[in-house]
Image: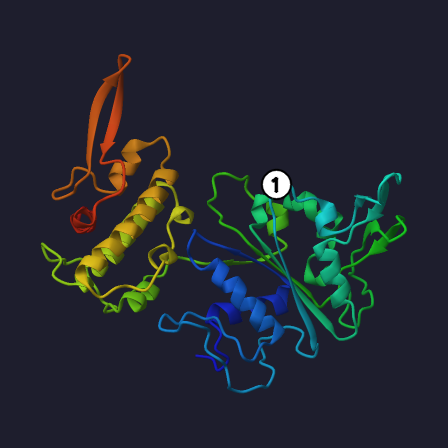
Amino acid sequence: MNDHKYSNDCIRILELLGERNNVLIGGPPATGKSRLLAELKHAFRGDSETGSSYQPEADIPLPNKGNTAVPAWLPSQDCTDRRVFITAFDQSTHQRDVLRGLVPKVLGDGAPLGFSVSKGILYRAAEHARKPDGAALLIVDEINRGPAVAAFGASIVSLESDKRLGADGKPTPATQTFELLDDSGQMVDYALPRHLYIVGAMNQADASVAPLDVAFQRRFAPFWLTPDESVLHKHFGLDSNTTGQLPSQAASSKDVYAALVLGWQKVNERLALGRGAAFQLGHGALMHAAAPAEPNKALRYAADCWSLMRAHVDEVFFGDLRGVAETISADAPGSPFTLTSATFAEQPVLQLSPSGELKPDQVYPALKAIVESP
C-alpha cells in the first residue's frame, strides 16, 4: 500500500524513470495503458489533489489529502518546475515534429515563401528540463505507430541515462552529443538533460504496424501490463475464488458476471495458446460502464462485452475461421455457434454462424459452453 493515492504500477514506473530515464509500457489492448498514462501525468507533476488509480465506486478522482512530503519514488525530487509533454505518433510523424527541422513559413499574401526551424515536442521538453529547476516528462502514446527511429533521429545516441548531461547540466565523460539545427538554421551539438524523462506506450500485438526497432527498445526499461481478473472481480462484486462451476441457467446478475469473467479468461487462454500472450484482451474491455444489478440488464451488459470479445477474436484470427471457432467453442454442448462446411465455386469453404451479435438470451449459454469446454 502507498499513501499517495497512486497505483503500484504508477509508482514502479516512476522508480524506473529515476533509474533509466526511459520506460516503454506495453501489453494487450484494454489492459489500462491510457489510464496509467493519465495517472503518471498527475504523479510526475506532484498534483497532491489528483489521484487516478482504479476506484470503481468513484464518479470523479478522489482527492489526496495525505502527506505532502516529496515521495522517494518521484524522479528529480529537488526540481519544482515540473512539466508533462504529451503526444501520439502516427505514420506522418517526422523528425521535425520531435526534434527540429525546416518547415514552411507563411508570410502573408504576395510574400515569398520562407522557412523556419521547428521546435518539436522532445526538443521543447528537453529545453524545459535544462532549466535550473526544471524537470520534464515526455509521454509518447502509440509510439510504434510512427517511424520512431526516424522521428527520434540522432537523439537515440543520447537517450540512455548514462549518455545524458550530468545532474548539474554539464557534460560528463560519457555524455553523447548529436547535431541539430539551431534557430538560425546552423547545425550545433546538443545533448539531452538528466532531468528529461520519456515514457512510450504501445500495443505490442498490433498487427497493422511494424515491430518497434530492437535497438530502439533497448534504450527503454520495459514495463508490461497483463489482463487482470482481480480488477474484474472488484468491478462486478465477485468472490476472488470464483470457479468454473456455473449453474445451468443464470439466476442472478452474479451468475451472468461470473460466466462473463470466466469466459473471458478461457478465451484469453486460447488466444495466448494460438497466437501468443500479447494477443489477449485486457480487462478494460469488460468495464465500459457500471455493472447493473438486474439480471436482464446484466445479460444486455454481457452481450455488449461479448461483441467486443468476438470482434477481437475475429481480428486476431483473421482469415482463420477454425481458429475463431476453436476459441469460442463452436459446436460445444449448449453453444449457439456452429461451424459448417459448404462449397463455393467448387471449392470447400467454412461458415461460422451466427456471425453477428448475440442476443442477450444467447450470451449466458455461449459463455457457459466456452467455460466448460476443454
**Residue closest to the far front:** 109
Residue 321 occupies quadrant: top left
* Residue lying at 75% horizontally and 57% vertically, measured from the top left: 123
**The N terminus - image quarter:** bottom left
**Residue 269 visible within the image:** no
Residue 235 occupies quadrant: bottom left
Compared across the picture, whether 176 is left or right of 152 comes to right
Disc 1 element: loop
Dot 1 amino acid type = Gln
* Residue lying at 24% horizontally and 32% vertically, measured from the top left: 352
**Residue closest to the far top:** 346
Circle 1 is placed at which residue position? 91
Mark 1 nearby-residue class (10 Å; few <14, some 14–19, many ≥20): few
Residue 270: x and y in percent read: 30, 45
Judge by depth and name the residue closer to the eye, 91 or 327: 91
Judge by depth and name the residue closer to the eye, 295 or 88: 295
Judge by depth and name the residue closer to the eye, 74 or 174: 74
Compared across the picture, whether 98 is left or right of 47 comes to right
* Residue lying at 48% horizontally and 82% vertically, measured from the top left: 3
Image position of 9 with respect to 30: above or below: below
Judge by depth and name the residue closer to the eye, 2 or 170: 2
**Residue 124 visible within the image:** yes
Residue 220: x and y in percent read: 60, 56
Compared across the picture, whether 224 is left or right of 370 comes to right
Compared across the picture, whether 360 is left or right of 58 comes to left
* Residue lying at 70% horizontally and 78% vertically, measured from the top left: 80
Image position of 365 with respect to 126: above or below: above
Tally of numbered tags = 1
Residue 70 occupies quadrant: bottom right
Specify the color scheme: rainbow
